[in-house]
Amino acid sequence: MRAFLEAVKKLDAGFAGLPAFIPYAADEEELMEVLTATAERLQDNYPYFHPLYAGQMLKPPHPVARLAYALAMWINPNNHALDGGRATSAMEKEAVAEIASMFGWRISWGICAAAARWPISKRSGWRGS
């Protein structure tokens, strides 16, 4: 846990130049009520995280992956667009490239972007009616 707290301090230091902001702090009772209700509602899911769940072919996230995700959520980035999360978009590209390299593939983001703009009819061979 100390590693996570140190990482949060490092992350916060990168935004130290912003004007002061004090978010609304729920009291402990309100916080417990919201988190308990959320935990109860989340129990109405399949146990995707558990390796014995037959419907899930993936393994549960590694504890380090969970901590890294929690750290990213500290600033709530949007990695679906470069203007919403420059760092996380770059990290996503790196992860995809590493996965591709496991299969001997090499990713060219220029080609990927061009393919994404190529009309679906041309990509799939569909000619329409």
Image (tube, grey):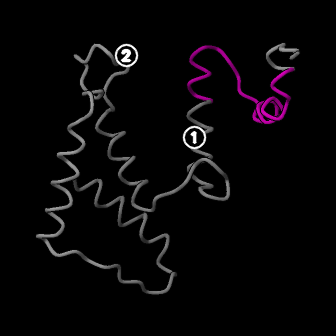
Compared with 73, 107 (above or below) is: above
Residue 118 covered by magenta stretch:
yes
Q: Which of 120 and 14 is in front in this view?
A: 120
Badge 2 element? loop
Q: Which of 20 and 42 is in front in this view?
A: 42
Which residue is depicted at the point 18% across and 53% down? 37
In space, the residues marked 1 and 2 are separated at their CA atoms by: 22 Å
Which residue is depicted at the point 23% across and 36% down? 44
The amino acid type of the residue labelled 1 equals Glu
Which residue is depicted at the point 20% across and 61% down? 34
Q: Name the residue under label 2.
A: 57
Q: Which residue lies furthest to the left in this view?
A: 29
Image quadrant of residue 10?
bottom left
Residue 52: percent from left, percent from top: 22, 16
Q: Which of 77 and 68 is in front in this view?
A: 77
Q: Name the residue under label 1.
A: 92
The amino acid type of the residue labelled 2 equals Met
Segment tinted magenta in the rendering: 97-121
Compared with 55, 36 (above or below) is: below
